[in-house]
Structures are given as C-alpha cells and as structure tokens.
Image (cartoon, rainbow, N blue to C red):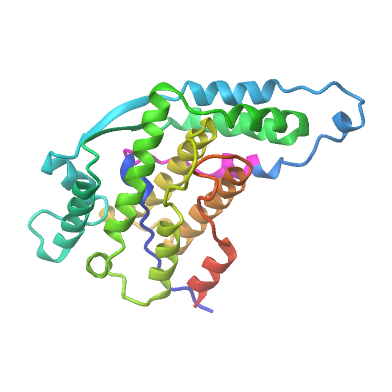
Amino acid sequence: MKRKPFFCITATAILYALLLIGCDALDSAMDTMSKNVYEEVGFVSADTSSADEVAGKVNSLNVTKVYDLSDDAKVKDIATKYGYKDGDTKTEAVYTQLKAALTKAGLGSWHVLDPQPENDATALTESLSKALASESAKKELIAQLDKPAEGNHQKAAEDSLNLLDAVAKAVNTSEVWEAMGIADGSPIQSVVTTVLNSLAPGNGVITQGDVLVLQMTTDVISSAVSSYITQKSTGVETKTPVQIAETMLSGVQNVQNIAGELSGKTSGFFDFKIGDLLDKLDG
C-alpha cells in the first residue's frame, strides 16, 4: 500500500543545534549484542574494559548553558525549528503554545547535554557495541550506568527531561498540527503523538544510564529532523519523508532496547512497538 507523506517532529530536537549524525553506528551496536560464547565456557578471561570505556565516555560528555526562557527571542528560535515564521499568523500557534508551556514549567535558564560531533557519536556507539557483545562486560556496564548521575550531568538530565515533557505538551495541540500541515485524526498525527507521549519523564533517580540514553536519543532524532528541515528549506529532496522517518524509527528502536536494560527515568522511553507505527504509516 502506498505510504502517506510523513512529517516527523519530536520534542528532543529542540534541545540541541541541528546536527547531521547518522544512525548506522547505532544500528551496528544492537547487531553485535550476541553473547561471547568463549567467555561463557571459560576459554578466555572476561574482559570488561569496554564497559569502563563507555562509562568514561558518558562521564566526559559536555554540558552547556542554553536558553534563558524568559527571553522571548530565544523561545522563537526554538519555535522556528517546528515551522514558526515571525509575522506569519498561520504558524503563530507553534510559538504561542510553546511559550505557554515553557512559562508554565518555570524552567528559567537550563542546561542540556551538548550534541556530539559525528566522530564522537560513532566512538560512543562502537564502545557500547563492544560492551554489549560480552555478557560479562554488559553486566559491568549496567552496574556502572545504574549509578546516580552527578554534578553537571544531574542538572543537565533533569532539565532535559523536564523540557521534553513541557515541549511534548506544547506541540501536541490541534493548532500546532494545523500549522504543520498535519490533519487531525491522520495516521501521521497518531504516529507523532505516540512518539511524543512516550518521552514523558518517568519516576526514580536520574542515572548515568539516563545521560547515555538522552545523548543517543539526541543524536538519532536530531539527524532525522535535520534531514527533514534541510530538505524543506532547500526544496531538494534526497530522501522521501517516509525514508527519513524509517531511519529515525530504526535508531529509536536501538535506543529503546538499550534503555530497557537500564534503570532510571528513561527506562520507559519509546514504549511502543516500532512495527505498529510503520503499519500506521502504511495506512
């Protein structure tokens, strides 16, 4: 059945500068999750250095101060990533709803994790791939990442989770759907709503694993949204909207699997079946 055009908007992307980071490295991370048979039968000693490497990379992620949300111009900067155009009455709802939700949240100035350069994102997922390929390293990795986040990472994760919740509520309105050109009751609206609702922060302590999941989510989602907005602004379509959506959902599936192995507030991120969403796009 012919697929319908797909416009994917998601709350996480507004946290970061648009950055084109592909999902191939993350795909390979999940492809190599098979157990190391030789370790299990005792032929070789367990090597957990890859778990230490991942934990080290998580602890070294950068944190930066971003927007002061009392500055109206900064909120408009965020809203433009969702189609808002200054002076355009049709898209005014995007800014209005976002401003209202952020004001209600009372976040003020907030900190978030910096987007990773492509090489660093690839290195992180390669280290993760190695750790998940060994049962011993996987257990060590889970033990390390289940520890509470500390310092700047604690603040960044807390602000990011709160912002995700606020933005999800802001964009999930009929006025914003109309501004985006997405009809009420359409399969596309259903898919996007499912993704947005699944990003609500859960309960519990913010862990180092939460920091990892948030970083991977950023890389995957930012890549997809960047591709869409770039094509929309240039008028040059190198990938169909559905292809962009499929790439994004593939990366989301990998993040979903990894988050499910960890404790913390992001353990329930993307709590849905990817196949069900693709079926909805098929109509």
- Image quadrant where one finds the N terminus: bottom right
**Is residue 186 in view from this perspective?**
yes
* Relative depth, front residue between 118 and 45: 45
Q: Is residue 262 above or below residue 10?
A: above
Q: Magenta stretch?
A: 16-29
Pinpoint residue 30: horizontal percent, then vertical percent. 65, 44
Residue 5: where, in percent of width, then height?
Answer: 40, 69
205 sits to left or right of 64: right
- Residue at 36% x, 29% y is 155
Residue at image position (46%, 59%) is 245
Does 162 lie within the magenta span?
no
Which of 108 and 119 lies nearest the eye of the viewer? 108
Q: Residue at x 31, y 75 (%)?
A: 183
Q: In this orientation, does residue 235 appear? A: no
Q: Is residue 221 left or right of residue 89?
A: right
Q: Position of residue 208 (x, y in %)?
A: 52, 30
